[in-house]
Each structure stands twice: as C-alpha cells, then as structure tokens.
Image (cartoon, rainbow, N blue to C red):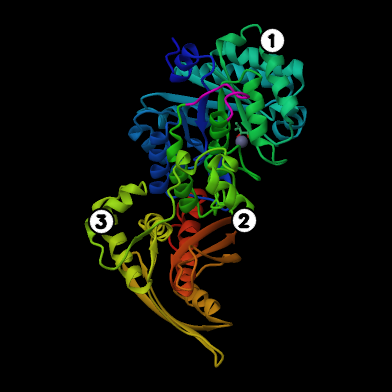
Amino acid sequence: MTDNSPAASIADRAADRVVIFDTTLRDGEQSPGASMTFEEKLEVADILDELGVDIIEAGFPVASQGDFDSVREIAERVKNATIAGLARAGAKDIDRCAEALRHARNPRIHTFISTSPVHMRYKLQMEPEKVLEMIASSVSRARNLVADVEWSAEDGTRTEHDFLCRCVETAIAAGATTINIPDTVGYSTPQEYEALFRMVRERVPNADKAIFSVHCHDDLGLAVANSLAGVRGGARQIECTINGMGERAGNAALEEVVMAMRTRPDALPFHTNIDAKMLTRASKLVSAVTSFPVQYNKAIVGRNAFAHESGIHQDGMLKNAHTYEIMTPESVGVSKTSLVMGKHSGRHAFKEKLKELGYELGENALEDAFRRFKDLADRKKLVYDEDIVALVDDEIVTANDHIKVAALTVIAGTAGPQTAALTLDIDGEKKTHQATGNGPVDAIFNAIKALAPHEAALELFQVHAVTEGTDAQAEVSVRLSEDGKSVTGRGADPDTLVASARAYVAALNRLMVKRNKTKPEAMKAG
Ligand code: KIV
Ligand code: ZN
C-alpha cells in the first residue's frame, strides 16, 4: 500500500513543518477526574479540526462501547484532520480500531507496546524477542487495514538503546509510517530526549521512511521543553493536548508548543498549521466540558497570562507593549474585557456577541442561552464577556444531561437549621425534596442525594468569581469519587448556592457517563 497520509505528504513538502497530533480526547480524557460525554467529544473534535490540528486521536475503540461510538462518529464527521484510534498490539484491538475508523477520510491506527525492561518484565511478562514479534505482527496487521500506521514504544525513554533501535527498525519494516518514542513517565530531560532522537535516526537503517514523533508527560514539568527538544532532534510530530490535559501531571500543552515555535522562530525554526487565534476558545471549551479549571497563571491561556499588575509593568505597557509582552493577547484569541450588553439587548445582538466570542449554537441551545442571559442581565448590572462565556459553557455542558436543576429555595443564616427545597428534572420527570444540613450547601447536597441516591464521596468543593464585584457570577467546581474513579462538575450562576447545586448535579451526570463506560447497565442515577 502506498503511504498517502497527510503526515507523509506534509513531511515531503517542508522539512520545518511540524505535525500536530492532538490527544485531548484519548490521553487527555484519561486525566483522573476528567470525562466527556459523547456530544462533548464531538464538540471538542469539531474545534480541534477548526483549529488546524493535523491528527485527532479520538479514543481507544476497544476500551468501551462509548469510546468505539465516539471514535466512529468523529471519524465520520471530521472534514480535514486525520483521525487516529489507539490499539494495543493484539489483533482484537487493531481490528476494532479499524472498524471504528472505517468511515474516516484519513484513518490512522496507532498501535503500541512497552519496550523498557521494567515494563516488559513486570507489566507484559514477555521476553524482548516476543515483543519484537508482537511489533511485527501488530504493525503489519494494522497496515493491511489502513495506509497510515503509527507505532509507539511505550516507556521509550527508559528503553535500552540497542533494543529500541531494533524495535523501531522492525516497526518500519512492517509498515509503520510514524514512529513515536514517548516519555511515558515524564522522566527525560531535554538534552537526553533530543539526543535520543538523533541516536535512533542515525542508527536505524530505514529511519528515513518514517516520521518521528514526541509524546511527553509532565511529571517533572518538562513536557513542553522535552517535546521541543525532540523536534530539534529530528522529530516532526508533536503529540499534545489542549490545556496539557493527560494522565497524572498531563501531556505537553498544545497551546504552549505552538506558541513557543511561533514566538521564537530564531531558536525553534519550525511551523505548524494551527490557527493560534482559536487557542483561547479551544482552551475554554475543553476546560468547560472536562470541568478542569485552567490555572490562573497557566502560560498562553491562563486568565493572568496577559494581565499586568505592578505599577512598573503597567507604566511600561502604556509606553510600549513590547516592554512586557512577547506576544499579543489578540494573537491567541484573547479579546479585551469589555462591557457587553444589558437587559435591553435583543436576541440578534446576543447572537452576534456569541459569534464574536467564537460560539455558534443551534437554535434550541441559542434559545436556552438567551433566556439565561436575560435572567442574568435582570439580576446583574454589568454583563461582561466572561459572564457570557461562563453561561454558554454551562449551557453546552449540561445540554444533554439526564439530571438538571429545575428549582431551588434555600433558608440560610444564623437561626438554622439550614434548609433546601430542591426540584430536579430527572429524565424529564420533576421530583422535589426538602432537606436540612450543616449549612446551606450541605442541605442542597443532601436534597440531591435524596432525589438521586448514590454512594459517591465529595472530594472537592471550590468556588470562584467569574468577574469582579459582589454581583459577580460564582463558578463552582465539585469533584465526586466512586470506586476509585473521580469526576468533576462545574456550575455557574450569580447565586452561589444555585451554582453549587448545578455543579454537584453536573458531576453526578458525569459519574453516570463514567459508570456506563465500565458497566453499560448502570445508566441510571442511584
Ligand atoms: O504515554 C504513553 O506512552 C502513551 C502511549 C499509548 C503513546 O500514551
Ligand atoms: Zn501518554
């Protein structure tokens, strides 16, 4: 089969072009506490495609029916990007992956096996010769099903060099078109990682037949530095995620690797196909659907990334922005905070505003968001862009939830007992319960537990204000855990107690999705 994959043609065209392989929907979704519904995954895939990502790793089809369905749907609908599915080295994984990718315009099977002594001995319990056999058989099986096959050496950075070279040579001989050497445990340093790529590319006789790829984890905070070092060592594909989501400490952040190359072409003379103006929007969407807040001081997309607090800095910025700004906020899609609209703004103006903020909602979602905006404008004097973003993200995230908050009345204060009368909409049926608690939030959570019984433990309850002022919307995060799995839900509202109820219910909805992944029969709450 000839290799007509986009990755191969890109490599032919320009030696300094770096392919962006986004794994937010696979490695990113493996972040403890993160999980996305089917619809949310489609939304993320759409924005990644619009962003200009070359390859979207859409999931791990053999892992669950849910993963299979979302990979298949993404493969069918995405217009530009190559769609990759992950598969272990066994025939069942590879066949299931190919089936999920059947309708993709450009399908890629990404198959992997561990190659380090510690993984081969304890995890696989396989001799190195057997691992080599598995590489040959898995890659050739995948290559008989699709033209574009990526092979990864799991725990590649802790693999003996001679053996790693034999593995890579075997994978390329069997038909792999991309070779990924992951720093699975985030152990490498930039110098080592760069040298590793140079060494493999020099020593493996057929190395020029494949594109090399980096995949770095952030356990030592070096994922971005290591990824860029790998590119300096000859890799031309970066595997990364929006907001650096991923297993444990996460993967290299897409927005950081892209902006590093764009801002420092003198030191990193490489380019990508990413439309950087969409980075902020993509970050916000991923944060909203995974309920993973972006840390304030996060590079590129954190809310403080372009904020200047000290008098000296502000003075410098007023004289010339170059004094303290190495890239403009506009270049990554940050619009200046602006007072947007009030209670007299109409549907048309609201729709235009959403467009400006990068949202295009369907008719029903637009109607719901507009209703909530009017409600917000009635209660809050100044409505900022951030308020609208919080409101719309909340709307998007909850659109397909089984359980919704329909009404809430709380009695709080010194007299006690604090009481919550709550109505939930559970699969279209309204149910009401009144509960007391040790404070109003506890009373609300007790009412939710009574209406949707469950055993999950509350691990985190966090509140922050979306904007300044006492009438600011509250954004609440709630993390629940059950059977070693944790999920996070977020809710926004000017009333902190309503936001708390929404956040708890959002987490509960996510928990049902997660349960459904391992136990298809456990769909209902409680
Ligand atoms: O970190 C890792 O090694 C992985 C592989 C499956 C590519 O995620
Ligand atoms: Zn990984």
Whether 266 is among the magenta residues is yes
Ligand 1 picture quarter: top right
> Residue 11 got which mark?
none
Disc 3 to disc 2, C-alpha distance: 37 Å
Residue 200 position within the rendered picture, expressed as x and y whole percent measured from the top left:
69, 15
Secondary element at image label 2: helix
State whether residue 48 is above or below residue 395: above
Q: Which residues are magenta?
A: 264-272
Q: Which mark is residue 202?
A: 1
Three-letter code for the amino acid on which mark 3 is drawn: Ala
In the rendered structure, the answer to whether residue 39 lies left or right of residue 479 reads: left
Q: Is residue 183 visible?
A: no
Q: Quadrant of the N terminus?
A: top left
Q: Which mark is residue 311?
A: 2
Residue at image point 58% right, 42% down:
244
CA gap, disc 1 to disc 3?
A: 59 Å
